[in-house]
Amino acid sequence: MPEKIRAINKTSTLQKAKNYLRQPLSLSLFLLVSLAALLTVAVLFFIIVYILIKGVPYLTPSLFELAYTTENVSLFPAIINTVYMTLGSLLIAAPLGIFTAVYLVEYAKRGNRAVALIRLTSETLSGIPSIVYGLFGLLLFVTALHWGFSMLAGMFTLAIMILPLIMRTTEEALKAVPDAYREASFGLGAGKLRTVFRVVLPSAVPGILAGIILAIGRIVGETAALIYTAGTVAKIPGTPMESGRTLAIHMYALSSEGLHTDQAYATAVVLLVTVLLINMLSAVIAKRLTKGQT
C-alpha cells in the first residue's frame, strides 16, 4: 500500500512538472511565489538566529532578580508588568470587540449605514500609528482624567489600539460560520440569543482566538504608546495607578542608554520566547475547544 501511494505521488509530481513546462507563465509564477516564500522564511530565520546569538550568552541569573537596580538591570519586573498589561488590556478590549462584532453580524440589518460607518471607523483606527494612540492616552487618561503615568492608563490606551483588530477578526470568524447552523438551531426552537451564544460563537472560537493572539503580539511589542501613558519605572507596581515598564520598554530603555546593550539583546530573547509560549498556549487552547465542539 505505501508503494502504491508513492507511485501515485510520483506520477502526480511528474504531471505537474509537465504542465508547468507547457505553460511558461505558470512556471514563472510558481518560481516567483516559491522565491518569495523562501526569502520570507530566510529573513525570519536570520532574525531569530541573530537575536539568539547576541542575547543567549548574557542571560545571567542577575537579570531575573526580583528588584531592578543599575547593576543587575533585572528584567523580572518587566516580565510581570508585561503579563499584567496584557491581561488588563484584553479584559477591557476583548468583550467590547467580540460583542460589537456579534451585533454587526447577527443583529444589525444588512445595508445599515451605521454598520458601514462603524466598519470604516475600525479600519481607519487600525492604520493609525501607535505614537498617536500614545499622545491620545497622554491627553485623555494621563492629563484630563488625572490618572498620571500608570498601568491603568496604558491598559486603556492599548485596549483602544487593539479593539479594531479583535472586532474585525471576530466579525470575519462569525461570517465564516455556515448559515445552516443558525437555521438548524432556529428549526429546533432555539431563540436568537441562545443560537448566538450556544451555536455561532462556539463555532467561531478558533477565529476569535486568532485575533486575540494577534492582539497579544501587538501588546507585548508595543513601546511608543506605553512610554506616554504607563511610563518607564522599572518596578512591579503595587496598584494599577502606579507606573511600570514592560519588556519592550525595558529593552528600548537599555538600548537607548547605550550602557547595557548586551542585556538589551538578552531581553529580546526573553521577549521572543514569551511571545512563542503565548502563541503555543493559545493554539493548544483553540485545539481543545475545537475538539470539545466535535
Image (tube, rainbow, N blue to C red):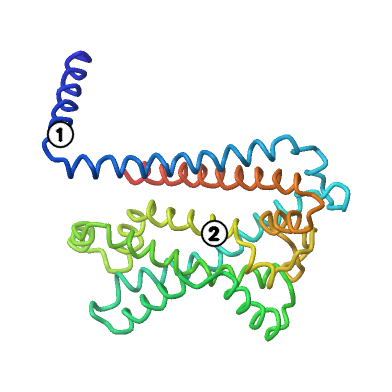
Q: Residue at x 36, y 62 (%)?
A: 197
The secondary structure type at the circle numbered 1 is helix
Name the foreground residue: 78 vs 46: 46
Q: Which residue is mark 1?
A: 21
Q: Image check: 20 left or right of 79?
A: left
Q: Image check: 70 left or right of 229?
A: right
* Residue furthest out toward the bottom: 144
The secondary structure type at the circle numbered 2 is helix
> Distance from label 2 to label 1 (Cα)?
44 Å
Q: Residue at x 61, y 63 (%)?
A: 88
Is the residue marked by circle 2 packed among few (<14), some (14-19), or many (20+) residues within 10 Å? some
Tell us which disc is closer to us: 2 or 1: 1
Name the foreground residue: 180 vs 40: 40
Identify which amino acid the numbered label 2 is placed on.
Answer: Arg
**Rendered location of residue 24, percent (x, y):** 16, 41
Q: Quadrant of the C terminus?
A: top left
**Rendered location of residue 38, percent (x, y):** 39, 39
Sequence-first disc among 2 and 1: 1
Which image quadrant for residue 56? top right
Q: Which residue is mark 2?
A: 218
Q: Quadrant of the N terminus?
A: top left
**Rendered location of residue 292, percent (x, y):** 37, 43
Total number of numbered discs in the rendering: 2
Which image quadrant for residue 28? top left
